[in-house]
Image: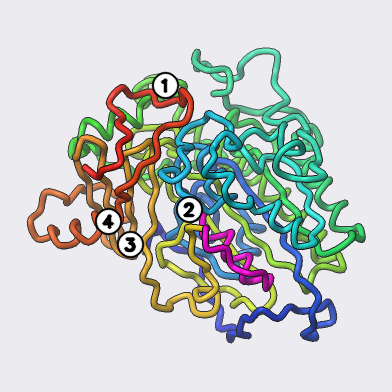
Amino acid sequence: MKTKTLLFIASPVLALGLSNCTVSTNGDTNSTPPNVLFIAVDDLNDWIGCMGGHPQAITPNFDRLAARGVLFTNAHCQSPVCNPSRASLMTSLYPSTTGIYFLSPDPIESPVANSVTWMPQRFQDEGYYVTGAGKLFHNGERQNERYVPNYGGQFGGFGPYPDEKISSYPGHPLWDWGVFPEEDSMMPDYMIAEWASERLSEKHDGPLWLGVGFYRPHVPQYAPQKWFDMYPMETLQLPAIVPNDLDDVPPYGIDITRLHHVHPPFDWVIENDEWKPLVQSYLACVSFVDEQLGKVLDALENSEYKDNTYIVLFSDHGFHMGEKERFAKRSLWYDGAGVPMIIAGPGILQGHVSNKPVQLLDIYPTLLELTGLAADPKLEGNSLVPLLQDPGASWPHMARSSFGPGNYAIISENYRYIQYNDGSEELYDIVNDPHEWYNIAYKPEYNEVIIQHREHIPVFRHEILGEGSTGHQSYDATETKK
């Protein structure tokens, strides 16, 4: 199972059975369309209690939601960067299909992406009242213009900011960490949670599709003092690593994960004794956003929508906190591309865990089936409804992540296979080596496993749209598999 230490125990709740029927607020089956609560958390790795990624993580509301539904412990983004990940999620199309690989261009510039109906628009077309706030797409300030009707505004984005950086890191201004500001109410995520709670208290024309996009724990990793107090420095544990972890990683793989040195280099962090402060700040941000999640869940519980709402919670990608000698996203290892994902709602098993390989672009077709809407054959994801009925059901699919054309991770239930654009490879046994410390691609006994995973690498790779942000001269967008 792809977790470092799985703390969540499946409860013995019997399946209620899913169908295209919906459930009314009094529990009777009727034709009332179900609502959707769509919750995104930016840069969240598996450092939440129910996933055991960090043994000291305090996240009662993430855990509470997991206890209400199915927790996917082997879920993956389609790209470990905000823009392509969110574009892929909302269209259920791979980056290799749309050409959206990096932080630019805006997804609306992709003709392929716009050949499908984006998720919020599809639900609006079906009669839903669609609204949201926070970071749902990468370019959040334009959501109201292009993607999410009735968008609730920016609420300050990643701000507020102190007059000068708190940490000693001299790099990119967003890369900062420490205690700031004084009160929770000054944080954008606090305001977003309040706004979402108000929407849940209102009556809307038609069923509700509510998007809630939290910014933390994205950098700058700021939170008020009380959240830091939850993680005393003297007892704080650092993530487990092994010496010389990168010795068996191909040079190409090391290069593409260390582009744009906006994040603190591992050596700088060690030399300046900043590892524990970084871990403390990240955990503080996670616990802060956990409380905001709790407010939204409480508001749902106190609303008329409580018995007829499907909840989907996910992160757009993971985040390294020292693993593989890095502090950033932008990698095809689990710490960069793995994500938490929880789905709960009427008829879904409660307190269950699935370690089947799933991906963010599966969310769109899943919500269509859960809400009884017709499937869209253009979507490339697979409905997760079979796993919501039986988390251990037969699942013939593998997950695929990419970082630029030609660089792919193919994930099965037992292995992560990585192929880079120069043909170099990695293979990890994620059952016996969940930290992905030991590259076994060179071992002849795994040749058949590698062949099976290679078959899932796409032959077609859309060219990079616009200038993009490749950061690597050897990217090669061709239509043939190398």
* Horizontal side of residue 178 vs 416, given as left or right: right
In 3D space, how far apart are the residues under numbered discs 3 and 1 (Cα atoms)? 30 Å
Q: Give the amino acid at mark 1.
A: His
Task: Measuring from the top left, give residue 424's x and y in whole percent.
Answer: 19, 40
In 3D space, how far apart are the residues under numbered discs 4 and 3 (Cα atoms)? 14 Å
Picture residue at 26% right of the left edge, 39% below the top: 420
Extent of the magenta region: 361-378
Q: Residue beneath label 4, please?
A: 433
> Disc 4 or disc 2, which is closer to the eye?
4
What is the quadrant of the N terminus in the image?
bottom left
Label 2: state its secondary structure: loop
In 3D space, how far apart are the residues under numbered discs 4 and 2 (Cα atoms)? 18 Å
In 3D space, how far apart are the residues under numbered discs 4 and 1 (Cα atoms)? 29 Å
Q: Which mark is residue 260?
A: 1
Is residue 234 shown to the viewer in this render?
yes
Q: Residues within 10 Å of mark 3 (few under 14, many from 20)?
A: many
* Horizontal side of residue 298 vs 339, given as left or right: right
